[in-house]
Image (cartoon, rainbow, N blue to C red):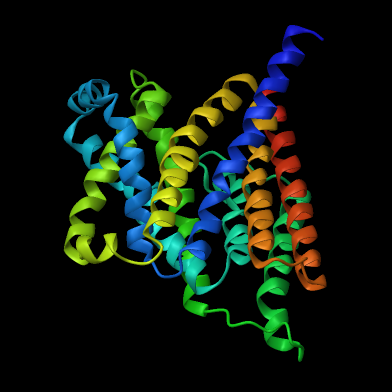
Amino acid sequence: MSAHEKNLGIGITAGISTGIFWGIPFLVPQLLPQFSSLEIAFGRFAFFGIISIFFIQKVLRIVKSLSLKDRLLLLLLSASGFWFYSMLLFWGVHQTDGIIASLIIGLLPISIPLFSPGRKSGGWKFYLGLLTLLIGLLNLLAYPLLASTKIVKATSSAGVCALLICLALWTWFAVSNSRFLRRNPHINRKDFASVIGVVSFVSILPVFLWQVEISELIHREGFRLYLICSMALGFGASWLANWLWNICSFHCPSEIAGPLIVSETIFGLLYSFIFENRYPHVYEIVSILLFLLGVALAVTAQMKEHQKKETD
């Protein structure tokens, strides 16, 4: 095996491992129905913030180096990509389920390049992929309501709207974050993750203290599980996942790294079906297959467009 193949294998393994941890946020709200989305989000960023504090000197140095405009943008980035996004995501999962949430957030490999500046049309294959994704999502959301079967379950339209807002927020975060880092090349991506962790914790802390009675939270049934899940979210789904994704991005070209984001959706779905202790219904299998086909078509079109752009 050549060194290139070995490095590529390391990158792909890291990318898939990232999905293992990124799938956790779709499961945790289902494990903690008695805890609010704010409480779950705070637990996540409390642990993420604690880990990031070990790098506080770098964090302070980076923040001091930023202009006032970039500091304000940093607050928006931490909200749209981390603490507020997480609150809304957890609430959306509470209102729907991890399956619907996984597929809606799984549109990120399409929405990010779609709204990236300077994007060229990916041709008919890209738009066919978008249409396939839309049909898959509509099937997932509409079939239980239209079919006169026992599989009908309450799906909150407000929850679906919240998840769509999450999709929009993280799409904006991804595009704006790339622009922010290009404008500040002195910031290392690994260090920036610590900056975001600290800023997110500082941002959500006053909201948490305002809305939550801490003594009641500590004595609530299931608090030990809450701590375990918070650690899994803060260390696993945030800090460790970011570290693994940096390895993936370093060893894999964007044409390979991009599609690996789908592993988040796959593990989110897997965790949800395991939690519900069932196999997917036929309409869910159809929706998932349409989703994977749509992503494959759209991402392939983007890859070809990217390769063409590099050769021109």
The quarter of the picture where residue 151 lies is bottom right
Q: Does residue 312 show up?
A: no
Q: Is residue 39 left or right of residue 178?
A: left
Give the residue at the far bottom of this rendering. Answer: 148
Image quadrant occupied by the C terminus: top right
The quarter of the picture where residue 96 lies is bottom right
| Coordinates of residue 265 in the picture (x, y in percent) | 64, 51
- Tell me the residue at 41%/34% (across/down): 179
Q: Is residue 107 left or right of residue 85?
A: right
Q: Does residue 229 show up?
A: yes
Image quadrant occupied by the N terminus: top right
Number of marks drawn: 0
| Coordinates of residue 76 in the picture (x, y in percent) | 30, 47
Q: Please determine whether, in this image, residue 5 is positioned above or below residue 28.
A: above
| Coordinates of residue 59 in the picture (x, y in percent) | 26, 26
- Tell me the residue at 67%/38% (across/down): 260
Q: Nearer the viewer, residue 262 or 309?
A: 262
- Tell me the residue at 55%/45% (across/down): 22
| Coordinates of residue 8 in the picture (x, y in percent) | 71, 20
Q: Please determine whether, in this image, residue 292 is positioned above or below residue 7.
A: below
Q: Is residue 208 left or right of residue 30?
A: left
